[in-house]
Image (tube, helix red, strand yellow):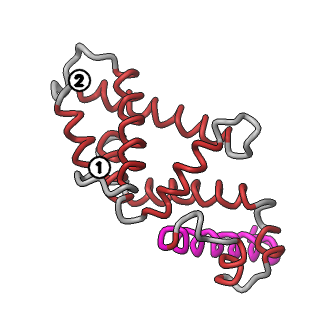
């Protein structure tokens, strides 16, 4: 049965908002992007924009979820989560506004009362599991030492990649993705 008109239009408008928000935030950054600017980009009032998401925080969480989905689709050719992580870190050097949104929101969401807390708990759990599985596969293939614990390596990879991306906001001279690869070469 086809989707009802108003519902389908609402879903399409929400997707349009997220696409516009990804572009505006990537270009201008989290702090320099207002809901007024995002609303204007899609022909809505601020109230109209927030109608689709409930609040500014929920809008930005949806932007991060959309970014994750775009990364997953764009990197479907990568053999494992470790390869995807390196590619994402490299890609993110070209979208500093999204890195700024992610780093700010992840820090704020450490508070269990923050609306995005559950998103980050789930995201880090899934990422840690996928990376640990990638480490196990590489250990079985003989490309990573079996002496190291896969779960601990996964946690370190997340910490290093997040930290390097934050540092890249301060003009880190090394390419963050190359540093992730370097860490893997030490294992």
Percent across and percent down for residue 78 are 30, 49
Please state if 76 lies on the left or on the right of 30 as rendered.
left
Residue 69 located left or right of residue 78? right
Which secondary structure is most common in the magenta stretch? helix
| Residue 145 as seen in the image, left or right of residue 110 | left
| Dot placed on the residue nearer the N-terminal end, 2 or 1 | 2
Estimate the spatial distance between the alpha carbons at disc 2 and disc 1, rounded to whole Å. 23 Å
Residue at the limit of the structure toward the top, as seen here? 147
Nearer mark to the viewer, of 2 and 1:
1
Tag of residue 176: 1
Graded by Cα atoms within 10 Å as few (under 14), some (14 to 19) or many (20 or more), the crowding at tag 1 reads many
Given residues 100 and 1, the one toward you in this image is 100
Label 2: which secondary element? helix
Provide residue 151's location: percent of width, then percent of height: 40, 22
Q: Are marks 2 and 1 in contact (CB under 8 Å)?
A: no
Q: Give the residue at x 37% y 55%.
A: 170
Task: Please state, as top left, top right, bottom left or bottom right, where the N terminus lies in the image.
Answer: bottom right
Place of residue 164 in the rendered image (x, y in percent of width and height, measured from the top left): 35, 45
Q: Measuring 39% from the left and 58% from the top, which residue is drawn there?
A: 92
The count of marks equals 2
Tell me the quarter of the picture where residue 106 sits: top right
Q: Secondary structure at mark 1?
A: helix
Is residue 23 located in the magenta-colored stretch of the structure?
yes
Q: Residues within 10 Å of mark 2 (few under 14, many from 20)?
A: some
Q: Is residue 22 magenta?
A: yes
Q: What label sits on residue 139 in the rendered view?
A: 2
Q: Which quadrant does the C terminus fall into?
A: top left
Q: Residue at x 72, y 34 (%)?
A: 112
Range shown magenta? 1-27
Task: Residue 168: give x, y in percent of width and height.
Answer: 35, 53
163, 90: nearer the viewer: 163
Q: Is residue 81 left or right of residue 47?
A: left
């Amino acid at each position: 049965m086809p989707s009802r008109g108003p519902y389908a239009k609402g879903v399409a408008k929400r997707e349009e908002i997220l696409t516009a928000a990804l572009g505006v935030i990537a270009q201008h950054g989290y702090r320099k992007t207002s809901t007024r600017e995002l609303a204007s980009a899609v022909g809505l009032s601020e109230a109209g924009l927030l109608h689709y998401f409930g609040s500014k925080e929920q809008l930005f969480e949806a932007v991060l979820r959309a970014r994750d989905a775009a990364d997953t689709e764009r990197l479907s050719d990568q053999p494992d989560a470790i390869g995807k992580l390196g590619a994402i870190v490299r890609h993110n050097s070209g979208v500093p506004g999204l890195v700024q949104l992610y780093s700010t929101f992840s820090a704020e969401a450490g508070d269990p009362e923050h609306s995005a807390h559950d998103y980050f708990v789930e995201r880090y759990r899934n990422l840690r599991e996928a990376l640990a599985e990638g480490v196990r596969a590489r250990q079985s293939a003989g490309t990573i030492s079996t002496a190291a614990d896969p779960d601990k390596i996964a946690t370190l990879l997340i910490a290093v990649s997040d930290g390097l991306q934050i540092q890249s906001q301060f003009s880190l001279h090394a390419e963050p993705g190359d540093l992730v690869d370097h860490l893997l070469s030490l294992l």
